[in-house]
Amino acid sequence: MTLPDCTLPELQRRRALPNERRTAGLDALVVLAGPNDVALLRRLPEARRWLDLHARAKPAALAWRSTTLANGRQTLAQLGYVKAGASSFERLTLAGKLMRELAARKPERIGFLVGGAVADAALWYEALLTAAWTESFALPVFRSRRPDRWRLKAIELYAAPILDVDRIAASARAANLVRALTALPPNKLDAGAYRRALVELSRRHRLRLTWYSQARLQRLGAGAFLAVARSNAARTAGIAHLRWRGRKRVRGNAGRSPDVALVGKGILFDTGGINLKSHRSMLDMHTDMAGSAVAVATLVALAELRAPMNADAWLAITENNIGPSAYRPQEVVRASNGTTIQVIHSDAEGRMVLADTLALAARTHPRLTIDFATLTGACVNALTERYSGVFTNRPQLAAALVAAGVSSGERVWNFPLDEDFDSDLESPVADIMQCNVEGKGDHILAARFLKRFIGDDNAWVHVDLSSATRRGGLAHVGTEITGFGVRFALELLLSVKLQQRLPAA
């Protein structure tokens, strides 16, 4: 397997508004303005066409319309109307709709202009860039004939304010990496291929990679992970540990303890095991590794940005197969932290592999651990795929989690994590039940189960990725695989307010 090409189109900045010569060199020009900003339209090339476009109907916030200019290139002209105080999700959604209409023409060079009267112009430019870099990225296909892909070569920004282009680009590349990895068929991204991809990513981004093989995990007593992995035809499953060190060593800190540990569920295909899934439920279970893709892509983005923090990623990589050696309900297994688990349902494998992975990550004493997992259907039932669920053992982080979702446009909802939920996981034969038989509130019970393996001394956030896939896409993403999680994680990790809420290193 070769890594996807996440190279972004060239970005060019123009201080002035586009003139006729510049516009004639564009395949499309996207203009965002206030509903009453007629003065801006009068200053554009072929102003009469823009004014006629504006007069076509009463302007409405977050709506858009388009026409074609009369130059030799027949430049597509898109006019969108901003909304005062729009949320990040609303900005991204409008930008995504504009880019999907534009993409039908397969343009090579496009221009963006946000009117000077727009108060939050920088945020609208960020949304347009993110949407363009997302829409123009091609997910992997395996047709016998090479597909005619859209190859966007350049984006021109006109009269744009100062933007953190490096962060916008790193975030877009990371989200595209998540989408590409998640889209790969299970015979293309098996455990061996994933490991090779991680080796290449580590080489490119100067990460340190340690692979915990099944034999090594056996020595570590990681019985929860190994129970899930034991039905695999090949013994290639394992836990990957990647490290980025962006903070200089200081006295008393040997650089061993990370500021953050990013943990991801990497179930490369989920049959459900002994409790076999139905056809419709199993069909897209190659996407059950999205959490691991979010974790590693976030680490890659931090490395690209040379973020001044020490960060780790831990990826639980295996399949959940059916077969004579598959783990079964009522088995009792012991995790690496000594906790014994009564198995109830083989399709609750995600929390099993995360149990050992979280326990191993906890041994490094990170200031904060965040795990990402497509863990429960209950979270989808509670929120649909428009939001993802978050849980934390530090109530003071709850507001920061929700705020990061609002700011990033990847919205999350904080669920309760009260201790009395543990009564639903009491086992007559082990320390804890893997899940409850009835399934009520399974997303909450799964979080309570995972909390057992992180330890009370470690700050922890669990993200149940109900938004990892959504038919019709989400916000600026037009594909069913959304890449949800990277924007949220980067906003959370690079937020000063979050750092203030964490204990000192």
Image: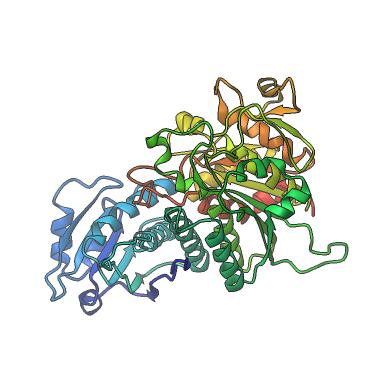
Q: Look at 52% across and 39% down and name the residue there.
A: 322
Q: Is residue 145 left or right of residue 408?
A: left
Between 215 and 20, the one lying in front of the other is: 215
Between 232 and 480, the one lying in front of the other is: 232
Q: Residue furthest front?
A: 324
Find residue 70 and report its image quarter: bottom left
Q: Give the color scheme: rainbow, by chain, secondary structure or one colour.
A: rainbow
Vertical side of 150 occupied by 488: above or below: above
Between 277 and 493, the one lying in front of the other is: 277
Q: Residue furthest right?
A: 252
Question: Picture coordinates of residue 167 (x, y %)?
Answer: 52, 64
Q: Quadrant of the C terminus?
A: bottom right
Can the viewer see residue 34? yes
Find residue 107 and report its image quarter: bottom left
Q: Look at 13% across and 74% down and name the residue there.
A: 71
Can the viewer see residue 304? no
Vertical side of 96 occupied by 341: above or below: above
Question: Picture coordinates of residue 417 (x, y %)?
Answer: 65, 29
Question: Picture coordinates of residue 323 (x, y %)?
Answer: 54, 40
Find residue 334 and report its image quarter: top right
Q: Is residue 73 left or right of residue 117?
A: left
Q: Look at 32% across and 70% down and name the residue there.
A: 152
